[in-house]
Amino acid sequence: MKTFAELDAKICSCTEALTSKIDGSNGKRAILLCGGTGCISSDSLVIKEKFEALVEKHNMGDKVSVNIVGCFGFCSQGPFVKIFPEDTLYRLVKIEDVEEIFQTDILGGGIVDRLLYVEPLTNEKVAKQDDINFYKKQKRIALHGCGVINPEDINEAIGEGAFAGLKRALSMDPKEVIDEVLAAGLRGRGGAGFPTGRKWSFAYANEADQKYVVCNGDEGDPGAFMDRSILEGNPFAVLEGMMIAGYAIGASEGYFYVRAEYPIAVNRLRLAIKQMEELGLLGDNILGTGFSFRAFIRLGAGAFVCGEETALLNSIEGKRGMPRPRPPFPAVKGLWQKPTIVNNVETLACVPFILREGAAKFAECGTEKSKGTKVFALGGKVNNVGLVEIPMGTTLRELIYDIGGGIPNGKEFKAIQTGGPSGGCLTAANLDEPIDFDNLVAKGSMMGSGGAIVMDEDNCMVDVAKFYMEFICDESCGKCSPCRIGTKRMLEILTRITEGNGTMKDLEELEELGNAVKANSLCALGQTAANPIISTLTHFKDEYLAHIVDKKCPAKVCKKLIQYTIIQDQCFGCGMCARACPTGAIEQTDYKAPGKKLNSYQIDPAKCVKCGACLATCKFKAIVQK
């Protein structure tokens, strides 16, 4: 394609083809299977092959198509199979279910009732995706096209709206494109929430013979998979966003920095680049406008610190991934000392929507200072685990209970950790708080890149703080001593507390160290390292005191503070616990409980290593934790 007219014609034909696939006007029924990492690991590609074999066996190639699409988001219910045009969604599909779905639905026109989703609170079976509570309050902007298009087919991406935003941008002055992004109120989705248009304007204002756009796909937060799913589900949208950014600031090259642990995302990104080059949408003189742009991929080795933009730039240049002092900022001196903008995957995925639909359309969603939507990886102690995209301003209660389906097994909600290792815990008192950049910070947490881990009454908050500090210590690059040494000292204190050796002075030292590390660290990894400690101390100081004063873990998580005891009157004397014990800490006594035929057993605390094997083995619930 060399002109806008050719692109318009391509958009018309691709839109018609995609629409006819969904509504069945092409005379075919479409079987869609989730091609995200989670579902592929649960055999969705094998399920696809089995459907294809059945289509061939029944000579129905002219009546049925089988397609892979991106992530449906509802990860705890995958693998998914969706049937168009009826829009029937089957979940938790196994290889042995394929024959039944084909016979009952494709050939018979019925529904396999047992594979429909069941709402956890009402036990209602739901056949259509949009009728499931998990999806009702979501709005897809960054996830546009995911779960609908084949991410390996540029024609389907065009049919879903790809490159319409690029076309409009190329018809505008670069400064007008920046103004459009500013008017939309888009803020960086990587964590800091800096206005994207302002970042672009800084790079635009700097004259240079070469400028760069860098896409940060180095997603390292525990439990986070937002960027991976976007790249796997619609890599064309992120490429389009990168090109629009390049045109706006005057850059001719872009680099994707994606962790090597994301092979599916990387392969689909490579395929997308190749297909765009073949169509003339990447390369020289794009659509006859004189704008040239090329995209490259660099793989990260999994260092969390390389999510920090200057460490990331060092890694692309082949240097050790360590942060640079700022200023100068990358917009002035970035990649190879040239003006560079670094945006994360989700930010760039929002840009095509803004140019395609207009700034006002994007800004009508969200709050006054946080416009648009935010993608969260919702996990932990919640019924509906998965990827969700919600309008800014949605409350935590809506996220956890309406979309997330509440806490499993009737347990009580305790906290939600947002922002990953850089964030903090929010409690039941915050459930009705709207989710946006500024409000989360004001409540002691942060948006971060979008991790949201829900915790219930069985979680120990001291152990949670220790978990995140272990992660930070492992991932610190060691360049600056406040982070390198300070985080290690904080971890040592937390370890002492969880082992029952803590003192009241430790709490003072934790706070003092946290403030010192925050104030003196070079990059955001160290500057936010103490957030989980500070927030858990603020909201759950009673748990810290229980560990220090009472030498007990209220949640019974910290092993060295747990005691296993056999209730002898409930012990049947079977001896299974003794056989399971790896240290020989369980011995038979001379006591025989009333009504029991065999003598009971007891645990020697001096030999017990708190492994829990006895508790897991006992069928009579005679062993308890104290």
Image (tube, rainbow, N blue to C red):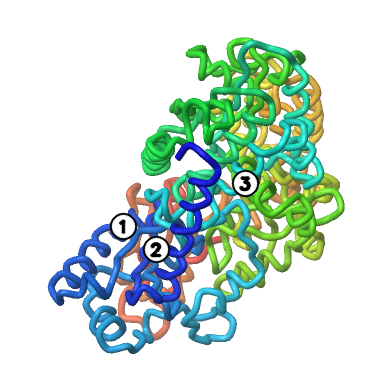
Using the rendered view, name the quadrant where residue 26 is placed: bottom left
Is residue 492 in view from this perspective?
no
* 517 w.r.t. 398: above or below: above
**Residue at disc 2, secondary structure:** helix
- Tag 2: residue type? Ala
Q: Earlier in the sequence, mark 3 or mark 2?
A: 3
Disc 2 from disc 1: Cα separation:
9 Å
Q: Residue at horizontal 45%, vertical 25%?
A: 298
Q: Which mark is residue 165?
A: 3
Q: Are marks 2 and 1 in contact (CB under 8 Å)?
A: yes
Neighbours of disc 1 within 10 Å: few (<14), some (14-19), many (20+): some
Q: Percent from the top left, x then y, of residue 519?
A: 81, 23
Is residue 520 in view from this perspective?
yes
* 141 w.r.t. 77: above or below: above
Q: Percent from the top left, x then y, of residue 543?
A: 72, 52
Q: Earlier in the sequence, mark 3 or mark 1?
A: 3
Using the rendered view, name the quadrant where residue 250 is placed: top right
- Tag 3: residue type? Gly
Residue in front for this viewpoint, 441 or 586: 441
What residue is disc 1 on?
580
Q: Are marks 3 and 2 in contact (CB under 8 Å)?
A: no
- Tag 1: residue type? Ala
Neighbours of disc 2 within 10 Å: few (<14), some (14-19), many (20+): few
Q: Which mark is residue 616?
A: 2
**Residue at disc 1, secondary structure:** helix
